[in-house]
Image: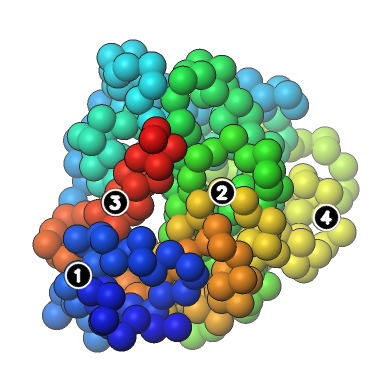
Amino acid sequence: MSSDGASGISSSLEIIGSGESLLATFASLRRPYKPFPVLAWNAHVETIAAFLFRSVPDVTFRRECLRTKDDGTVALDWVSGDDTRLPPDSPTLILLPGHTGGSSDAYVRHMLLRASKKGWRVVVFNHRGCENSPVTTPQLYSASFTEDISHVVKHIRSRFPKSNIYAIGWSLGGNILVRYVGEKSEKCPLSGAVSLCNPFNLVIADENLRKGFNKVYDRSLRSALCKIYKKHAVLFEGMGDEYKTKVAANPKTLKEFDEALTRVSFGFESVDDYYSKSCSSDSIKDVRIPLFCIQAANDPIAPQQAIPREDIKENPNCLLIVTPKGGHLGWIAGDEAPFGAPWTDPVVMEFLEHIQKLCSA
């Protein structure tokens, strides 16, 4: 359903789920969603402008590298000092960037600083190979691989047993996070989660990514992934004929890379099998912790037709906002537009603080 404004929430937002009364208390939602005028006419302009021109706050990190069960390596970037100076019971927030993203991305740093200033302990989970994270096995990451985030959450729980743990995932990171939350279901150790620009259905997202101007994003993602692969290509030598290493080094599309390497590394029969079995939309029904999803209706990479509206509506633990504009990881609107934090940041922070208050009551 769409809000009619009677609750105090902007009528420009589509809201699905049982939490509209909760959202009505959020100061960040009491004004209409108004994109920055010059950028509002085109989703591609907003997406690219956010990528090129959004400010990148200065942050000092302390890196921690974790070895996983398969002898892989995960890099955690802690906001320097937060993991040692804050009280043991301070809430901990894990950030999962999008495809090939990491702790240097503007949208990650803006959210990170907002939470840190509120007294939250914040850490960025960099996927294998991303943000110069070490690669120690012939395996990178995938949309369905949740073992690494599971390992990270267990590590943080053991280190801060008195802390409630939350997570935010953007784009592919959102897909991985929602799959993890659904897999853990009633046993999920997180107190809450937020998904932003989640592709949800990878079959639909893949088809959309290879249409028209969207091919620009396909080339960008493919190029960034190839750079990671080439840096560690020696690890994949001698892995068998099923690994198409030459294709992976110079694929024509992201799908071609996934067919040559990703689906093989993670045991799928084909790239189509990989995409169809990696959709986080299938996990919504199993979510048993508070999950807040925010999508943009004009997102060129995470198309709105892939949003599992009905499953979100039927699960009382889930809440969805769809903004009329925003592009992909754009949301150039609100008080800090056009160069500051995305419109979503204060909304997400209010949600997290609300859940933390409930957990601490």
| The disc label shown at residue 289, or none | 2
Q: Amino acid at mark 1?
A: Arg
Q: Which residue is mark 1?
A: 30
Q: Which residue is mark 4?
A: 268
Q: Real-space Cα distance between discs 2 and 3?
A: 17 Å
| The disc label shown at residue 350, or none | 3
Is residue 207 visible to us here?
Answer: yes
Q: Residue at x 80, y 50 (%)?
A: 264
Residue 78 point in image, percent of width and height: 37, 26
Q: Real-space Cα distance between discs 4 and 3?
A: 39 Å
Q: Real-space Cα distance between discs 1 and 3?
A: 13 Å
For the N terminus, the image quarter is bottom left
Asked if the residue at tag 3 contacts the one at tag 1, i.e. Cβ–Cβ closer than 8 Å, the answer is no
Q: Mark 2 vs mark 1: which is more N-terminal?
A: 1
Left or right, 146 with reference to 55: right
Q: Residue at x 73, y 24 (%)?
A: 69
Neighbour tally class for label 4: few under 14, some 14-19, many 20 plus, Cα within 10 Å: some
Residue 296 point in image, percent of width and height: 39, 73
Left or right, 241 with reference to 118: right
Mark nearest the camera among 1 and 4 is 1
Asked if the residue at tag 3 contacts the one at tag 2, i.e. Cβ–Cβ closer than 8 Å, the answer is no
Mark nearest the camera among 4 and 3 is 3
For the C terminus, the image quarter is top left
Q: Amino acid at mark 4?
A: Phe
Neighbour tally class for label 3: few under 14, some 14-19, many 20 plus, Cα within 10 Å: some
Q: Amino acid at mark 3?
A: Glu
Asked if the residue at tag 4 contacts the one at tag 2, i.e. Cβ–Cβ closer than 8 Å, the answer is no
